[in-house]
Image (spheres, rainbow, N blue to C red):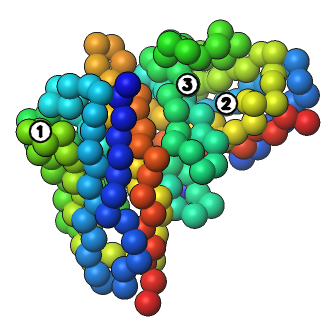
Amino acid sequence: EAQLVESGGGLVQPGGSLRLSCVASGFNFRRHDMHWVRQRPGKGLEWVSGVSPGGDPHYPDAVKGRFTISRQNAKNSLFLQMNSLSAGDTAVYYCVKEGSYGVWAFDIWGQGTVVTVSP
Amino acid sequence: QSVLTQPPSASGTPGQTVIISCSGSSSNIGVNTVNWYQHLPGTAPQLLMYSNNQRPSGVPDRFSGSKSGTSASLAISGLQSEDEADYYCAAWDDSLNGHWVFGGGTKLSVL
């Protein structure tokens, strides 16, 4: 069974940094695009980054220059380095697998890790 | 403000059919397929529908999706109490070098 487990969330001060990790199991990690999606308190889902199997990153303008997504295929791991954090980055961050073979969608989600940016 | 527009809430009684709409533009729904996600608070979101109208294995056929022009919809027939959840539409947007966009979510209540 495919599974994603996030870690690394926590409380960080404004302007600080945090690195999220995600370990995948139950599928061929190195063959799939992977993403991070967040949900701010009381808000909807928001895509914050994606990375191809070869490591090519992709970001929305809202986080470009502050967030860096990366992966280590040998360890079935996905990362999100978040810098210059502000209160607006407070959210649950989900590690997400993109499907393949015609399933152009986020087909597996982790349980999420909570990031709180506060003084 | 979300790029895709959904009604914030919807409701129905058990057995009824509920339809949730999702409105986009020519850079997202107009040219790309739509996916739907079901999210129960405190749990991981789940893929409910992909490529406009394809159900992943395990999703009951009470759920159906459609797309026309720059809008899409999710229909839930034979409404059940366990369907009470938040529903999100999503699509790839070709603008700004491309990015995934979501709707603001629709909270479905089963009365």
Q: Which mark is residue B48?
A: 3
Which residue in the rendered view is the most extreme toward the bottom?
Answer: A119
Kindly report which numbered mark, 1 or 2, lies closer to the viewer in this rendering: 1
- Going by the numbered disc 2, the residue's amino acid type is Ser
Neighbourhood count class around disc 3 (C-alpha, 10 Å): few under 14, some 14–19, many 20 upward: many
Q: Is residue A93 above or below residue B50?
A: below
Q: Which residue is mark 2?
A: B21
Neighbourhood count class around disc 1 (C-alpha, 10 Å): few under 14, some 14–19, many 20 upward: some
Instruction: Give how far across and how far down residue A43 sits, in percent.
Output: 58, 57
- Taking A17 as reference, is A31 left or right? left
Local secondary structure at mark 2: strand
Q: Is residue A39 visible?
A: yes
The reply to whether label 1 and label 2 mark residues of one chain is no
The chain that hosts pointer 2 is B
Distance of label 1 from label 2 (alpha carbons): 38 Å
- Going by the numbered disc 3, the residue's amino acid type is Leu
Instruction: Give how far across and how far down residue A17 sits, in percent.
Output: 26, 75
Relative depth, front residue between A81 and B89: A81
The chain that hosts pointer 1 is A
Pointers 1 and 2 in contact (C-beta within 8 Å):
no
Residue at image position (59%, 17%) is: B59
Local secondary structure at mark 1: helix
Kindly report which numbered mark, 3 or 2, lies closer to the viewer in this rendering: 3
Q: Quadrant of residue A10?
A: bottom left
Instruction: Give how far across and how far down residue A40 sits, in percent.
Output: 52, 61
Q: Which mark is residue A73?
A: 1
